[in-house]
Image: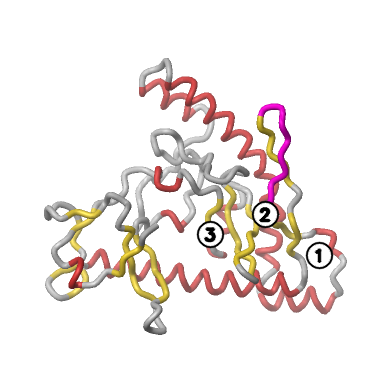
Amino acid sequence: MPLTVITQEQFADKTWRRASSYAFAAPSNILPVVLSELAKLVPAMPLGFVKAGDQFQLVAITSLQPGSNLFVAPDGKWIGEYIPSFLQTYPFRLVKSQEREENVLCFDTDSGLLNSDGEGEAFFDGSEPSTIIKTLLGVLSEYESGRIVTQRLVDALQVAELIQPWPLNLQQGEQTLPVEGLFRIDEAALNALPDDEILTLRQAGALPLTYAQLFSTNQLAMLSKAAEIQARIREQLKNLAGSQVQSVVDSGFRMSADETFKF
């Protein structure tokens, strides 16, 4: 994703369009998530951890196969019950500046949503960012604050040595392939923690995240269900009209009640 810092010099005469589908997320089998959305995530999809450098990161799992997101239908619709916050501000991202100790608002210039013809949403209103850009900046700043809090809790779980490799397998035809790179909470290690270490995690606020990940493992079945629905949709696409294909989608997962991007 080529991100360009939004400056008046480069974007004053440009506009942008909102994404009309989630096709951009189709290759993402994991998505970063934050503490504030756990209550909606746990019943919707499995949560796990991936390692980035020396740290673990909390993620939602949309497929056990890299490059595949089972929650994005062939027409780009999201067919799960909840859309992770990370996707709802696309094609904008907040990125730490290399020159300054602050975050800067960036735009994915490969998104196909940047306009030079004046149609769409403006980036600037005169010399000031437009109202919607200010709103976006606020939403992304709040998300970044949540990310920092979430990471602090994940770090506490890592220090307690509760995050361990997740032994998962992916069935491809007659082959059973091990899934690498995903981690989970080791429930046995959690139960064996001394009382003082449990108290430390509770005081840090890390226990809700711990149990959320454990409870969410039941949603691995959602991935199997989603895979079945995807296969049915693709088969139906060969033979049925668009309206009939939609009925196939609705017969399994349904679209979230709110299909719009919230700024």
| Label 2: which secondary element | loop
Highlighted magenta segment, given as a residue range? 173-180
- Quick one: label 1 or label 3, which is nearer the N terminus? 3
Question: How far across and how far down the image is residue 109, in percent?
Answer: 30, 57
Q: In which quadrant will I find the C terminus?
A: bottom left
* Foreground label between 2 and 3: 2
Determine the residue positioned at 51% across, 70% down.
146
Q: Is residue 174 magenta?
A: yes
Determine the residue positioned at 72% across, 55% down.
214
Q: Which mark is residue 190?
A: 1
The answer to whether 53 is drawn above or below residue 37 in the figure is below
Q: Quadrant of residue 176?
A: top right
Q: Is residue 172 magenta?
A: no
Query: Outermost residue, top direction?
Result: 239
Check disc 3 and report the residue beneath it.
32
The answer to whether 250 is drawn above or below residue 31 in the figure is above
- Quick one: label 2 or label 1, which is nearer the N terminus? 2
- Disc 2, disc 3: CB below 8 Å? no
Instruction: Name the residue type under label 2.
Output: Leu
Q: Residues within 10 Å of mark 3 (few under 14, many from 20)?
A: some
Determine the residue positioned at 19% across, 54% down.
115
| Label 1: which secondary element | helix
Q: In which quadrant will I find the N terminus?
A: bottom left
| Label 3: which secondary element | strand
* Foreground label between 2 and 1: 2
Q: How far apart are marks 1 and 3 (CA)?
A: 23 Å
Check disc 2 and report the residue beneath it.
182
Question: How far across and how far down the image is residue 2, in percent?
Answer: 36, 60
Main SS of the magenta segment? Answer: strand
Q: Residues within 10 Å of mark 2 (few under 14, many from 20)?
A: many
Left or right of 12? Residue 5 is right
